[in-house]
Image: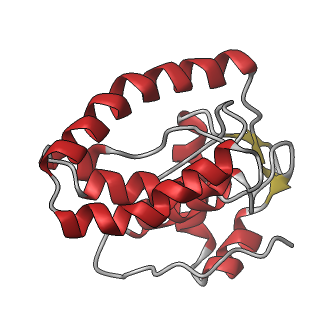
Amino acid sequence: MPHLEPRAISVQANLRDQVANALRAALIAGELRPGVIYSAPTLAAELGVSATPVREAMLDLAREGLVEAVRNKGFRVTEMTDQDLDEFTGIRTLIEVPTVGRVAASAGVEQLERLRPLAQRIVTAARGTTSSSTSKPITGSTWNCSPWPATTTSWRWWPTCASGRACSDWAA
């Protein structure tokens, strides 16, 4: 049984969406491994919710291509191809480079100082001395400083990893 990190799940927001976001985060953090089949009841127990919203969320993730349904067993986490990873890297470059430039130009000293330790983590990750999950808080923090308000709500799931190849990343 996987051990998922606790994530806050509020009853006021759509539970299905919250579970889907928690599962995306687990995928990104490597808590759910490619090729492994996970059952909705097992994941539900880990998240502290019933199996129904987990099953619905996993079907949403299946439509996104992140998992595939395995009849009478659960859901298998899909593996990304090199081409998928290259495409994500290209898209990410198109979006992130101008945004980081704008953040650097418009953010206040305090915001930039908060980003400095995260930037150091990027350098460390690029040297291959840490895991791919390093970029998750970096991306979220950078977008939160963005002068484009839509970026803080529309940024969802983009790949990255320490080796320069794309993996997965999610920020809200």
- In which quarter of the view is residue 18 placed? bottom left
Taking the image as shown, residue 45 lies to the left or right of residue 136, namely right
Q: Residue at 51%, 66% (x, y): give it.
A: 19
* Front in this rendered view, residue 154 or 143: 143
Taking the image as shown, residue 76 lies to the left or right of residue 64, namely right
Q: Quadrant of the N terminus?
A: bottom right
Residue 53 screen position, x and y as percent: 52, 66
The answer to whether residue 94 is above or below residue 140 is above
Taking the image as shown, residue 97 lies to the left or right of residue 81, namely left
Q: Residue at 75%, 57% (x, y): give it.
A: 32
Residue 77 screen position, x and y as percent: 75, 44
Q: Residue at 62%, 19% (x, y): give it.
A: 86
Q: Quadrant of the C terminus?
A: bottom left
The answer to whether residue 84 is above or below residue 64 is above
Residue 147 screen position, x and y as percent: 13, 47
User: How many dots with numbers?
Assistant: 0
Q: Residue at 63%, 71% (x, y): give it.
A: 51
The reply to whether residue 57 is in sight is: no
The reply to whether residue 156 is in sight is: yes
Residue 142 screen position, x and y as percent: 33, 53
* Front in this rendered view, residue 79 or 108: 108
The answer to whether residue 116 is above or below residue 37 is below
- In which quarter of the view is residue 47 placed? bottom right
Taking the image as shown, residue 60 lies to the left or right of residue 128, namely left
